[in-house]
Image (cartoon, grey):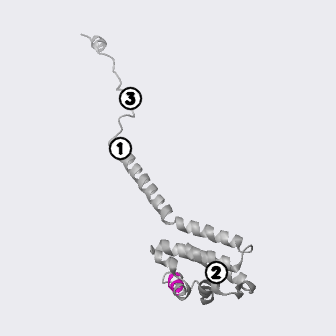
Amino acid sequence: MTPEELLSQLKEIHEPAAIGVWPLAPGWWILIVCTTFIAIVTALLWRRHIQKNGWKKEAVNTIAAIKKQASEQSHHQSLFLINQLIKRVAIYKCNDTSIKALTGESWGQYLVDFLNGPDTPNMFSTQQLNLLSEGLYQQTIDTDKSINAEITALLKALNNWIKEA
């Protein structure tokens, strides 16, 4: 047999089938599982962060509302709303509903301990703390012109305290 006859007996070379996308290689499966896990953990941590710090957003919005209404309402009403906000924050942070009942000197001492605590020392002046604890009980507070500036400074300090808390 001649070489040409031998070559004619050969069948054509068949190319292998193209490599498909499916089934995925094990490395791709590992990548998909890890990416999904990281996305779920990130979403859960973000959700927990939002829930944990939701009170801050609400408190800052309340402070903004008090600032807007301060010129339209009496100083007693502004101080009442500020005290009410501080009590709500304290009850949330300390998980102690007995704070609602604090007034007078006991409320003043609690304000000193709570607002000027170890994490945020000296954020509030003694005059601001006295205004919070005793201002509601003073009759001449509405005639004092410097009280507007004091309430504005108090709201600013409270806003900074909430952001740092």
The answer to whether 137 is drawn above or below residue 92 in the figure is below
> Was residue 15 drawn as part of the magenta stretch in this picture?
no
x then y, percent, for residue 73: 72, 74
Indicate which disc residue 18 carries. 3
Closer to the camera, 47 or 39? 47
Q: Which residue is mark 1?
A: 29
The answer to whether 160 is drawn above or below residue 10 in the figure is below
For the record, the magenta segment spans 109-114
- Helix, strand, or loop for circle 1? helix
User: Is residue 11 visible in the rendered structure shown here?
Assistant: yes
Q: Quadrant of residue 137?
A: bottom right
Measured Cα–Cα span from mark 3 to mark 1: 21 Å
As drawn, which residue projects farthest toward the left? 1
Q: Which residue: 51% across, 84% down? A: 110
User: Is residue 165 visible in the rendered structure shown here?
Assistant: no
Sequence-wise, which precedes: disc 1 or disc 2?
1
Closer to the camera, 24 or 127? 127
Q: Main secondary structure of the magenta part?
A: helix
Crowding around mark 3 (Cα neighbors within 10 Å: few <14, some 14 to 19, many 20+) is few
- Helix, strand, or loop for circle 3? loop
| Front label number (1 vs 2) | 2
Which amino acid does the dot numbered 3 rest on? Ala
Closer to the camera, 103 or 87? 103
Q: Which residue is mark 2?
A: 154
Which amino acid does the dot numbered 2 rest on? Leu
Measured Cα–Cα span from mark 1 to mark 2: 57 Å
